[in-house]
Amino acid sequence: MTPQTRIAELRLQLDRHNYKYYVENAPEISDFEFDTMMRELIDLEREYPQYADPNSPSVRVGSDLTSEFRSVRHRFPMLSLGNTYSLDELHEFIDRIEKEVGQAELVCELKFDGTAISLTYEHGELVLAATRGDGVEGDDVTANVRTIRSVPLRLQGKGWPELFEIRGEVLMPYASFDRLNAEREAAGEPLLANPRNAAAGTLKQQASSVVARRGLDCTLYQLAGDNLPFTNHWESLQQARTWGFKVSDAMRICRTRAEVDDFINHWDTARRELPFPTDGVVIKVNDFALRRQLGFTAKAPKWAVAYKFKAEQALTRLVSIDFQVGRTGAVTPVANLEPVLLAGTTVRRATLHNAEQMALLDIRPGDMVYVEKGGEIIPKITGVEHSERPADSRPFAYITECPVCHTPLVRYEGEAKHYCPNAGGCRPQILGRIIHFIRRKAMDIEGLGEETVELLYDHALVRNVADLYDLRAEQLAPLPRLGERSAENIIGSIRRSTEVPFARVLFALGIRFVGETTAKYLAGHFGSLDAVMNASREELVEADEVGDRIADAIREYFADEENRRIIDRLREAGVQLEAKARTLASNRLAGKSFVISGRFLNHSRDELKELIELHGGRNLAAVSANTDYLVAGEKMGPAKLKKAEKLGIRIISEEDFDAMLAEAEAPEAEPAETSAAEAGATAGPKAVDGTPGTEATPDSRAGRATDGSATASEEPAPDSRARQGELF
């Protein structure tokens, strides 16, 4: 047998045994036999590199080489689903479907609590794995996904399209999560919060060998492609199962409202026995023709909805209360609990918010308390079981001094939290300011995570942000977990940060109340840090978004001599302390003020803000009487929406905004003859999701009234999505 033939044979056998073990849960050989075959394959591939294959079973072990993640555009946008927490609302959803298309079969599935993934297969082989990202573009994580044993690298069976996508969820099973946290605890590392975050974080690890060790799983639930050979969703997934995909067995076709309710009631309890996290049930119309008839809104299909389980609650004992200090000196009380299983994870800690909240609950160490997860993620205490309170219990006295540096705490007027005023000598505040300084939206210094910053502080290499620019690679290389290569990368990233624009530098300084938007307006208004430093209170409040409280915080920051010394050192290091002149694309939005809220399909919030400024508009952080437009995305802040409606502010969609810019970019020679809608139409037909094929103006892609209801223009033509398969 030639080496090439033996390599092919081993790959075939290993693929089959991998499927039997990880998908069917029916292994036919021992782990030892499997490992022996794998070692033989790896040895042969190393000896005969001419037979390399990116989808060989050997890639399952991963690589220690690091890689950056490139952005890729989804062929079919990954739309999200509408959520409901109420059976009444779910019944209304079913009623709307029956009113529009008559009685329809519904497929009920578990809603997996992981991170969304889209897998592309060409000629039966995995060629791309991409995260959801913003729904239009995601990150290419193919190398990492290849290490997930339940993801087929080559398809089996027959009948699969030559090119298609399949969407699903990458999960971290509870067993993998508990093992990973046990390892982190033994190493003295901070524990991961929950399996969802652990899965998302693992998928973005730069070394695929790390991903391979963490035991991720993947369940698939939706196909997308051109001319898929199926008439309904159930049929497509049953066929996908024969191709080697892991498809959930917890699916059911329901024909009545009662059957849907039974499915939900069953899994609301039974999910606690599952080996992986879930947070609800997804209800979809089964028939693809009916889906096309029902259509889409700008952001979600009208033929599917997610019913979210109510937050699980548990009763446990409050053992003690700790206090954490943030970078601004804010003190947050944290409850230490007797471990309790909650929504699939063991909860040991929960936030108590502030002294007022604790007093409202009358919470005391030793109490039995009710804990639940807000949105199934963040543990919080919602009540006290007073009937189980010990007879000798005494009211809890809130601390009066910093738990770290023992400086007396202060409480500013109008603030719920207490603060430690010792900004220059309190360790967590110093570390917090440095960590804030290096983050992506600030100075974007790569390679310096929280643990590395603590390492530098503990070795007396860094005491403030200016110290970063004095570091040398030979100082970093000997430190634990670094080495020469990491040290050189960190120093290179620090050097590159001197090119970060002034507005981000101003934000990075961490001045109290000065967020990204306020920093941009200060930079634009004053032009340089010197001008901001020397401005009077009256001059500061003349800048957009700067009120008395922010002006006072800025003045207080620059009145500190230590802060001024840090600024001088940053100047010497070459950090940008002046704004560069900016060329506007147009004045179309001049004099208009915008507030951005929610998530968007075609742009990130940062991109929308950038476009507003490039066309002469102003970004505001909060809705006020000075706001002209509220650009409303998915899951926007309800308080902003309510205030905008109360003030009569115009609420527009992302597509409405795009149409405004399209009008700005229309040819100047024919301004009176070409409307925004016509300009969009002549640019080429677009479907609601941005793919070619549907005759639609920019308004018909947007099509949301200011009250949030769908307009008729959102309805695609009856066959406008036939070529795309069914997707979300």
Image (spheres, helix red, strand yellow):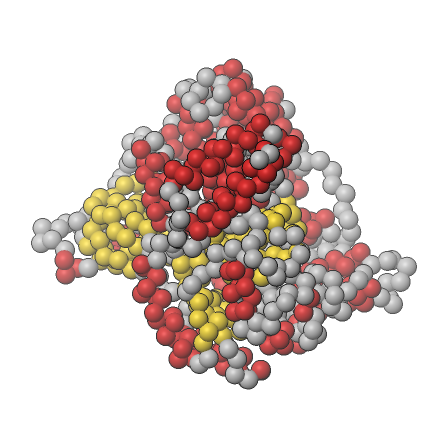
The quarter holding residue 386 reads bottom left
* Residue at (23, 57) in percent of width and height: 315
Viewer-nearest residue: 19 or 209: 19
The quarter holding residue 498 reads top right
| Residue, far top | 474
* Residue at (30, 55) in percent of width and height: 342
| Residue, far front | 1
Residue 48 position in % (x across, y down): 60, 29
Left or right for 644, reference 255: right
Q: Is residue 143 visible?
A: no
| Residue, far left | 391
Residue 510 position in % (x across, y down): 50, 37
Residue 276 position in % (x across, y down): 38, 54
Q: Is residue 666 visible?
A: yes
Residue 79 vs 489, above or below: the answer is below
Viewer-nearest residue: 269 or 381: 269
The C terminus, quarter of image: bottom right
The quarter holding residue 703 reads bottom right
Residue 596 position in % (x across, y down): 59, 56
Residue 319 vs 478, above or below: the answer is below
* Residue at (57, 74) in percent of width and height: 287
* Residue at (32, 38) in percent of width and height: 182
